[in-house]
Image (cartoon, coloured by chain):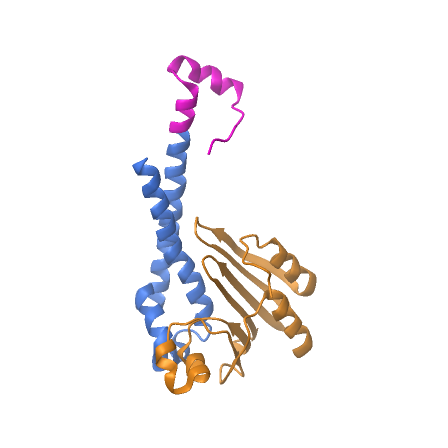
Chain colours: A orange, B blue
Amino acid sequence: MDPAPTRDFAPVIALLRSHLQNVVVLEENATPQRALLRASAQWGRYRVLVTEIVGTAREYRYYVLDGNLVVAGFDNAADPRAADLKYGKQAKHHYGESIPHLHRDDKAVLELTEELSCADFIAWLEASLQQE
Amino acid sequence: MTVQVAIQDKFAQALAPLGDLGQAIDIALRRYAIEQIASKVTELQRRDQEFARRYGCDYETFKSRSACDAQFIAEVERNISKTWELDLAEWQFCHEGACDWTQRLQEILLQ
């Protein structure tokens, strides 16, 4: 986990460049209240898409695509399916809540996860997906 | 907060006969800030509207529905984008970012 939210994305970009191939920073942008990083990269034949927003809260998306297929998608969006999984019958009271989760198998499977940093994601990638 | 900035001699000489140099710099910087921020707001609003067109509703509606309506998400994933979460993050930055900059612009204009 990152020690604290930071608006400096240089460490994240350096991390991506040291582990993945063809890293392209699609956008690095900031307002007085928040900052955005969007990047793409290759992991063997897989396309990796990374989005981070740092503001009052931290939003992340770490997606691995094989063509149009979502091989894995880690994010902490407020997804009602994740709320259903986490809270069961009480889920509707938690709709709108940021819930870390993972989409797999072209989004046919959803699992709850811990909050992820980019370093966590890369560790998962290296342990879980062979570069072909 | 006061910051010291070096002014090129040619500008200092040109502005000297026109009055207080510090005041002139403040006016110039204010105009520059307004121009830059207005440009940021326009660009972020343009992207906000592009997402609204793509998803057929405004940001607040999409954010609200995607957070509580699994059927809505299923339709979005089937008909528009399976990776809507990536779009939503970018959309959020554009929508809320335009508000951030608009607020900053108002602060400058009211000073």
Horizontal side of residue B34 vs A61, given as left or right: left
Q: Give A5 or A25, whichever is nearer the viewer.
A: A5
**Does A110 appear above or below A122?**
below
Q: Is B51 situated left or right of B86 in this image?
A: left
Q: Is residue B20 magenta?
A: yes
Q: Main secondary structure of the magenta part?
A: helix
Residue A73 point in image, percent of width and height: 53, 75
The answer to whether one can see residue A44 in this image is: no
Percent coordinates x, y for residue B109 in the rendering: 31, 37
Answer whether residue A103 is visible to the viewer in this image: yes
Hey, which residue is sitting farthest bottom in the picture?
Answer: A89
Relative to B100, residue B86 above or below: below
State which region is magenta: B1-27
Quarter of the image that includes the C terminus of chain B: top left
| Residue B30 image-quadrant placement | top left
Establish if B12 lies above or below B96: above
- Whether B71 is drawn above or below B100: the answer is below
Residue A105 drawn at (x, y percent)? 54, 83
Residue A9 appears left or right of A85: right
Residue A44 shown in magenta = no
Question: Which residue sits at x=59%, y=59%?
Answer: A24
How far across and down, in percent of the image, does residue B11 sit? 48, 20
